[in-house]
Image (cartoon, rainbow, N blue to C red):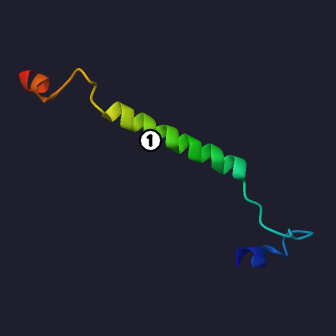
Amino acid sequence: MLVKLLTGVFDPPPESLSVPWAYLGVVLGLVAASVVAAIRSARPSSGQDAEHLRDL
């Protein structure tokens, strides 16, 4: 609907919509890296367990 509405604005009108695949790929890669970093930082290190935390 938006493309049909804005067709008169562009001279000549675009034949099809363009999708910025490179930008979407970079954003998805950064999101995946952020999720991995969040999971790694939230996970306790292997040397610490519940008994160690109880002693503090």
**Considering only vertical position in the picture, is 39 above or below 28?**
above
Name the residue rendered at 37%, 37% in the picture. 39
The front one of 17 and 47 is 47
Name the residue rendered at 36%, 31% in the picture. 41
Q: On the image, which quarter does residue 47 sit in?
A: top left
**Considering only vertical position in the picture, is 18 above or below 5?**
above
Provide the residue designation for mark 1: 35
Name the residue rendered at 39%, 37% in the picture. 38
Quadrant position of the C terminus in the picture? top left
Quadrant position of the N terminus in the picture? bottom right
Query: In the drawing, does residue 51 fall left or right of residue 28?
Result: left
Badge 1 marks a residue whose secondary structure is helix
Can you name the residue that lies furthest to the right here?
12
Find residue 14 and report its horizontal and vertical position in percent. Answer: 86, 68
Query: In the drawing, does residue 3 fall left or right of residue 45?
Result: right
Find residue 21 and report its horizontal and vertical position in percent. Answer: 71, 52
Find residue 46 and report its horizontal and vertical position in percent. Answer: 26, 24
Q: On the image, which quarter does residue 48 sit in?
A: top left
Query: In the drawing, does residue 14 fall left or right of residue 29?
Result: right
Q: Amino acid at mark 1?
A: Val
Q: On the image, which quarter does residue 4 sit in?
A: bottom right
